[in-house]
Amino acid sequence: MLFAMTCPVCRKPVEPVAVALTSKIVGPNATEVLCLACLAAKFKTTEERLLDAARRYRDGGCVRFKGLPL
């Protein structure tokens, strides 16, 4: 069953790519999942840089990013 996740910081829906990035960068045992904008703010970067990283992970064969629209 799929359900919508909400960012605990801004209350916006969490994008699938943000879930994958959290799992990859923070770790699979992360206790919270932030939306892309809040994740970028947390790591003092931009959303575009996070999306570039996600593309590299996908192109490198990481299954967390397989099939995600980037």
Image: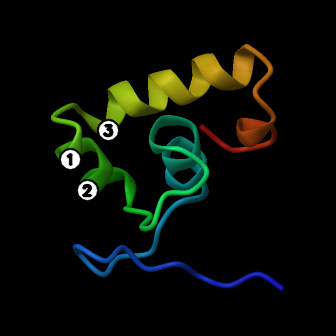
Q: Which labelled disc corresponds to residue 38?
A: 2
Find residue 38 and report its horizontal and vertical position in percent.
25, 56
Nearer the N terminus, badge 3 or badge 2?
Answer: 2
Find residue 19 and report its horizontal and vertical position in percent.
56, 55
Nearer to us of marks 3 and 2 is 2
Nearer to us of marks 1 and 2 is 1
Label 1 to label 2, Cα distance in Å?
6 Å
Horizontal relation, residue 66 to residue 52: left or right: right
Q: Which labelled disc corresponds to residue 42?
A: 1
Residue holding disc 3? 47
Seen at 64% across and 22% down, the residue is 57
Does 66 sit above or below residue 20? Answer: above
Amino acid of disc 2: Cys
Label 3 to label 1, Cα distance in Å?
11 Å
Horizontal relation, residue 44 to residue 21: left or right: left
- The color scheme shown is rainbow
Assess whether mark 2 and mark 1 are in contact (beta carbons under 8 angstroms): yes
